Amino acid sequence: MKYIDLMQLNPFQRFWFKLSTALKAFPGKVKNFFVVIGKFLANFFIGIGKAVAGYVTRFIKGDWATKLSYIIMGAGNVAKGQVVKGLLFFVIQLAYIAYIVFFGWGYLKKFPTLGDVEQGMQINPATGGYELMAGDNSMLILLYGVLTIVLTAIFLALYFASTKSAYTLQQKVAAGEKPVTFVEEIKDLFDKKFHITLLAFPTLTISAFTILPLIFMILIAFTNYNKAHLAPGKLFTWVGFDTFSEIFAMTEGASKGATFVELTKWTLIWAVFATVLNYLFGMILALMINKKGIKLKALWRTLFVITVAVPQFVTLLLMNQMLQEDGAVNVLLMGLGIIDKGILFLNSTPLVARITVIVINCWIGIPYTILITSGILMNIPADLYESATIDGAGPVRSFFSITLPYMLFVTTPYLITNFIGNVNNFNVIYLLTNGGPSTENLYQAGYTDLLVTWLFKLTMNSQDYNLAAAVGILVFIVCATLSLVTFNLTKSAKSEEEFS
Amino acid sequence: MIKSYKLRRTFSNILVYTVLLVLGLIWISPLVYLVLHSFRDEGLSTVSYLIPKTYSFKNYIELFTDTATLNFPRWFMNTFVVAIFSCIISTLAVLMVSYSFSRLRFKARKPLINIGMILGMFPGFMTMIAIYYLLKAMGLTQTLVALVICYSAGAGLGYQISKGFFDTIPRALDEAATIDGATRNQIFWKIILPMSKPIVVYTVLTSFIGPWTDFILAKIIMGDMRDNYTVAIGLQTMVSLEFKATYFKRFLAGSVIVAVPISILFLFMQRYYVEGVTAGGVKG
């Protein structure tokens, strides 16, 4: 169908056409998804196969020095004149072996069980007395076990690189070329291989303080590390998917499963309201400020934007204080004679507290939308509005028929990121209500707790580390799926222009 | 039905002015409350009226002189030192990562970008327990060094905004410089960085502001070590049940002291902020 044909259809037909094309495309998309995964896996294994094959052929074709560097890293490089590089390889190998022998192996060998000697009162063979003997610390075994595995992976990559480097060097020498000197390689690090120099430091810190902890926490979700199994006093061990089945188990009362369902519902309600309300009202306000004939635009803008500028924890703590029973809001309402007794905004009934946090979040979020959308709103062609006015459309009609569709088209990705941000909106809930009003019906959570604040409470208050890690993984899955869908949607939106 | 176009426009303008005025008042009033009551002289904690009766600098003076239990000047210095160090490290990290991802082409580029994207999707403090134990193993918990590490270690992941900026610099510049014999190192320092002053300033400011506004990490790392608190957790301590009765007004004063410079910095760089957000999250 040509674009012009589509435009001639009435809205229902157009909608039907779009829906049917989307539905028709769906099986193809699912198929594509699996094809992509399949290709990825195939490439992965082919890559491994090729690497192993290369590893073996290089050993067969290599001379004695290359062969030696399969056992002693860097031997090939030293033999052919790259002394410093070869020695560096060798030092790395020595360091790794020392690490494994003196530190890593002790933890790695206990990694499958996470320790079997429990701390307890035993007879100390040295003194003969009855003493508290240190047992295995499952937590440290897990942590250092992961560290050892990561270091081993890095070491294997380096080992592989060293054998390859030895072989390429051998070929170069055979072809009569001069081996690259160490100084030249250093120079290369500032030119052709500059990315290695630049990325080395950030990669190191990110690996140590983001990736390593992340792997550790993901693994924690598959153990029974909770307050009944606290290291170092008690041992904990692998339990597979038990924690997850605990979350999805539907039992009566304040169970973890029921809490998870309740909080997921509230998190979604919260995220939808927080995103949509902020977006709509922020845009309307931005339109008002930028309306033709309104003076002092900069003043109005600054009035709203200044609340974005003040650090969030200050405004949130302030709001928390103002909403207390004797706080400023109640004082104001009583002064105006609207109420005669202070309202407990944040910790009386769930509904009041939930509405309050959504309203307060509007106060915080709307200026952001004003800030972000002002520029884009200015880009909407003015003649669209003019012709709409000539056709007799009022401001409301113009907003819903011109502004909103245009903005939705342009800012969908921003909306989704915003939605994800709200799912993870820790600060607002934590500083405003701390999850309250508290209740006995939920496990370690209050009525305004989001999944992320629940995660926080589970780790900080009740030491349910495994549960917290599992919740974290679930939140990640939701957010990652949403991001991927958006990513695909924007792609499809871009190709939407190309009707055939 | 209002017939005259002019009359109709005036009417709608008046309507808009009223809405803006009312909403503007709602938006600004908590901040006015904050400033006014930080100068309030009478009363201890909260009072049952909105406009203070007497004003003085007492709260501010006490905030900086009465340091026996809650030491605000010390918290301020802590935050300042942490901010300076993490600002230097994170700015370098961000610029290095974004420059490599934007201007250099290498095999691992795409996979690394994807890994960075995925890492950004995990809830940030899911890892905090592990980080806490890592720091504990290094003997760093409850120290300022730990804070600097936490704020700057992951900084490289926030490369998107400056990458977007670097992407806009024409590649012909790099090529011309390469032909003239410049190495990539020289191109980075002598061509790209001088041209990227706005984004460097933005990166410096955001990473400087971070420690002033972060709350949760500092709290976990510092625990009850009050001497090493940053202003954020310090101020929260002031309104905790234990201290609120005597420290509420000083909390307001402290909030003003922290908020004013940061607000000014933000207003100064809001343009970059908007560009950053829209560059990543809006298709044009």
Image: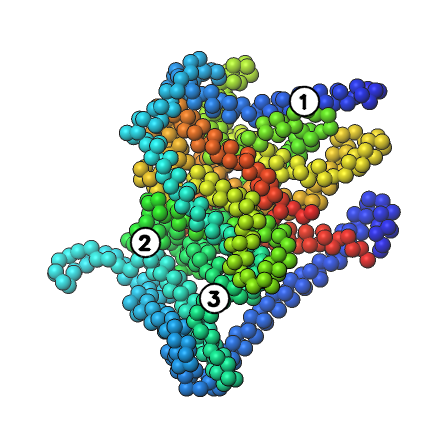
Q: Is residue A129 left or right of residue B40?
A: left
What's the amino acid at mark 2?
A: Met
Q: Position of residue A285 (x, y in %)?
A: 66, 30
Residues at discs 1 and 2 both on one chain:
yes
Q: Residues within 10 Å of mark 1 (few under 14, many from 20)?
A: some
Query: Which part of the image, by quadrant, shows the C terminus of chain A?
Result: bottom right
**Who is closer to the viewer here, B236 or A300?**
A300
Q: Which residue is mark 2?
A: B138
Dot 1 falls on which chain?
B
Disc 2 element: loop
Q: Which residue matches tag 1?
A: B17
Of helix, strand and loop, which one carries label 1? helix
Q: Quadrant of residue A162?
A: bottom left
In the rendered image, residue A143, in percent from the top left (x then y), is placed at: 37, 58
Number of other residues with Cα within 10 Å of mark 3, as a class: few under 14, some 14 to 19, many 20 or more:
some
- Decide if residue B121 is in sight here: no
Alpha carbon separation for disc pair 2 and 3: 35 Å
The three-letter code of the residue at mark 3 reads Lys
Q: Identify the subunit bearing mark 3.
A: A
Which residue is most to the front?
B180
Given contact means CB atoms under 8 Å apart, are the residues at marks 2 and 3 in contact? no
Asked whether A112 or B47 is in front, the reply is: B47
Dot 1 or dot 2, earlier in sequence:
1
Give the residue displayed 43% in from the left and 22% down from the top. Answer: B38
The residue type indicated by label 1 comes to Tyr
Q: Are marks 1 and 3 in contact (CB under 8 Å)?
A: no
State the residue position of label 3. Answer: A187
Where residue A394 sits in the image (x, y, percent)? 79, 29
